[in-house]
Amino acid sequence: MIEDDHPASLLEVRGLTKSFGPARALAGVDLDVRAGEVHCVLGQNGAGKSTLIKVLSGAHQPDGGEIRWLGEPVNIGSPVAALELGIATMYQELDVVDGLTIAENIYLGHEISSGGVLRRGAANKATRDLMKRLGHPDLTPSREVGTLSPANKQIVAMARALSHDIKLMVMDEPSAVLDSEEVDNLFRIVGELTEEGIAVIYISHRLEEIERIGDRITVLKDGASPASNLSVAATPTRELIALMIGRDIDQVFPPRGVVAADAPVLLEVEDLALGKHFSGVNLSVRAGEIVGLAGLVGSGRSEILETIAGYRKATGGSVRVDGVTLPHGSVERAVEAGMGLSPEERKSQGLLLEEPIFKNATLSTFSRFAKGGLLDEPAERRATAEQMTALHLRPAEPDRVTRTLSGGNQQKVMLARWLIHGTRVLLLDEPTRGVDVGARVEIYGLIRELAARGTAIVVVSSEIDEVLGLADNVVVISDGGVVAKVPADQIDEHGVLDLVMKGSAA
Amino acid sequence: MSEQVTTTGEAASADETPSSGGRRMRLPSSAGRSAGLVIALLVLILVGWITAGSNFMSLDNMLVILRLASVIGVVAIGVTFVITAGGIDLSVGSVLGLASVVASLGAIQTASEGFWPLMVFAGIATGVIAGLMNGLIIAYGKVVAFIATLAMLVAARGVAELISQRQSQVVVNQGFKSFFRQEPLGISIVIWIFAVVAIVGWFLLNRTTFGRRTVAIGGNSTAARLAGVNVKRHTMYLYMLSGAAAGIAATMLLSRTTAGIATHGQLYELDAIAAVVVGGTLLIGGRGTIGGTVLGVLLFATLTNVFTQNNMSTSVQLVAKGVIIVVAVMLQQRFANREGITSP
């Protein structure tokens, strides 16, 4: 962690502006980067992130404002000038040359040579050292870059940046092409860079990543920086969302409804237990109520939802939907009773990615549309199109392949599935994971709307702030058990963490 | 001369199959994906015509090819369902042998003297029971399909040997024999059965809730389960279906060989799986095509026929078959990778 009274900044940007003809791409950006920190730059598409990168890397010249490097005003006239200062950039569209080998790519433009003769052996040795440092000794110097996966090409691009003596590395949405394991490796490398004192500017629109690796944040919105150099630890998610979309904080989450005291209890969980994972979980959710489960990663939140839904077979306790007790371990019966789970990993647990939207939307109900076992696809398409319109899922093409949808729209397909089904108890595990910020706010609204229509909803999120903003009541989980149930408007993030700590101490 | 034929044949398949791969990228429908197979088949027919002339290009020979394809075709259609759901059934060949033995048991033949369909029923029932056991072991016993059906492959053959005491059981039931001797419209009843099974199979896979469940389980069994599909029960049904198909095929084979023998159907599982995979059904599940399977079966049957017509050894046939399987699977993997499914 970097102290707030840290000495001089490595990079200071003040009032940076840049226009392309009449279009104003940067309208006054302020930003400080210190040695050894991960400085996240957040913003929606079109907020000016790419232009900012290009100015810092010397590809574009700013119209106004000031850039100071190690306290001195500088003019970054070209990409070479940027590299000479010690600023390397890793673009999203990886600018590696497919036809060349890994070593040739890394030393492209600054080949190791003596008297005009390439010293291939030296370049190969240096490449091997770089790859070892990046945790990829398998990427040997002579491999052709065109044969590598996007993740490995990214490693090559990173190695090329490190082959210069750099003090600042700019990464433009590096996780966009990676799967979760590769993201872990990326974060490990970022951690090692910062330990060596190299600063990283990390561009992203994924809030969950920023919480994992970021030290400070600058938010871009319409070319300006409404907030610069915020501390990650001290800035709640809802504030970031509000800054990114340019709304007030109280508009990020929809207003809570009033849950009638006599509203029927649709979900009752009593003393539910699952082996070593958790035990003694009690929950009751009324029609129209949103209950959030809050707890640390590994506290068993997802397992609780999966057990309620019958995906895991409970070892004790009971689950009742609208008064009907469900057998343990039967998703089928739970769905029949009117319960639906939108799982944590939408892609691997929720969707048939290669199939059209409508087959995903009717995955729970295609039998209901069918007559005597014969599918009625036109009716399925109609029902899907109807829900797509209601959920603002555009374009409303039920035949589109599900893989091509954005994270937010894929989540809407999951919601459509349960809406068509007429689910009365909805379990949502990380409903906004991988969903960009604009769509998040929309999904919050939809969830609240479902509750207003009388659905009982349980939400699990790793962002405590999201749980607090969305839910009526918060159930705090610690060490595999419920430690408290509190109205969401009477507790804040610290309160929840206090309860978590107390729970695990007890 | 024979050497020349081989090169032409291989060049033809090597030229055609990549183009079918190209089509796969652009045409998402199974019809589009089968276009390459149709072309490969046509080229093969052309090769047969050029090399063997009217011996090959006659209606009689075409019917021979279809008859050759029928038994394995019915087996392959059953296997298509299992593979589409992401499973595998290695036991179909042995189950076919066992079913042929049960259907031709002296007692059964005598009992069905006045009602020959009893023999057919006995064959199919044998297949269904073997499939039920596969299904129970896989779905509820949580044994990997490859292992469970491998065990059944061994065990069913053993049971067949025990029952038949390693003797051929000659079919003497006149009703059975005369039924299968029929040739409506000049086409053997065996071919008609293949056609009916193919059409019913296509309908079942593409137009019914059963088919939708099958594809959903193969595409993402977790998602299917969380959506309320009873994955275990359906998995069991699928192996029963595959067993039933093997049972039907057993009675078809019984009519041709007129004897139930424990060794019937040896290596049929491999031919069937090869036809399914070459046809374009994804081995990892989630996408299945009955039309492709039929074309795959016809492709192999025609290949065999062309080679036989040219008096070429079965050894060369086996090599050609192997090449076709590898090329088809490589294309499939490429197809899968393009869609973002990374191989381990």
Image (cartoon, coloured by chain):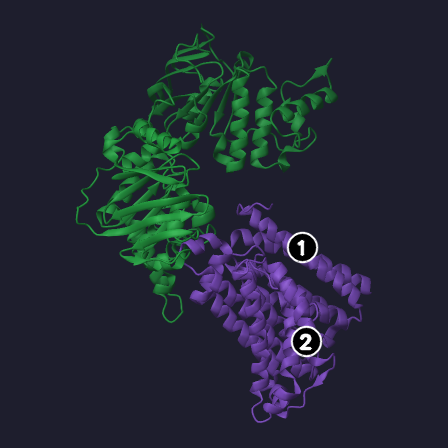
Chain colours: A green, B purple
Marker count (numbered): 2
Image quarter of the C terminus of chain B: top right
Q: Residue at x 58, y 52 (%)?
A: B22
Q: Secondary structure at mark 1?
A: helix
Residue furthest top in the image: A72
At label 2, the amino acid type is Ala
- Quick one: B33 or A420, which is closer to the camera? A420
The residue indicated by pointer 2 is B160
Tell me the subunit letter for badge 2. B
Residue B327's disc number: 1
Could you tell me if residue A464 is visible in this image?
Answer: yes
Question: Residue B160's image quarter?
Answer: bottom right
Q: CA distance from mark 2 to mark 1?
A: 36 Å
Question: Image check: A254 left or right of A211?
Answer: left
Callouts 2 and 1 in the same chain = yes
Q: Residue at x 63, y 30 (%)?
A: A136
Question: Residue A479's image quarter?
Answer: top left
Image quarter of the N terminus of chain B: bottom right
Question: Image check: B76 left or right of A15?
Answer: right
Q: Secondary structure at mark 2?
A: helix
At label 1, the amino acid type is Val
Which comes sooner in the sequence, label 2 or label 1?
Answer: 2
User: Residue A260: image x %, image y %?
Assistant: 17, 46
User: Residue B13: image x %, image y %?
Assistant: 68, 59
Tell me the subunit letter for badge 1. B
- Quick one: B179 or A81, which is closer to the camera? B179
The crowding category of the residue bearing disc 2, from other C-alpha atoms within 10 Å (few below 14, some 14 to 19, many at least 20), is many
Q: Is residue A328 above or below residue B247?
A: above
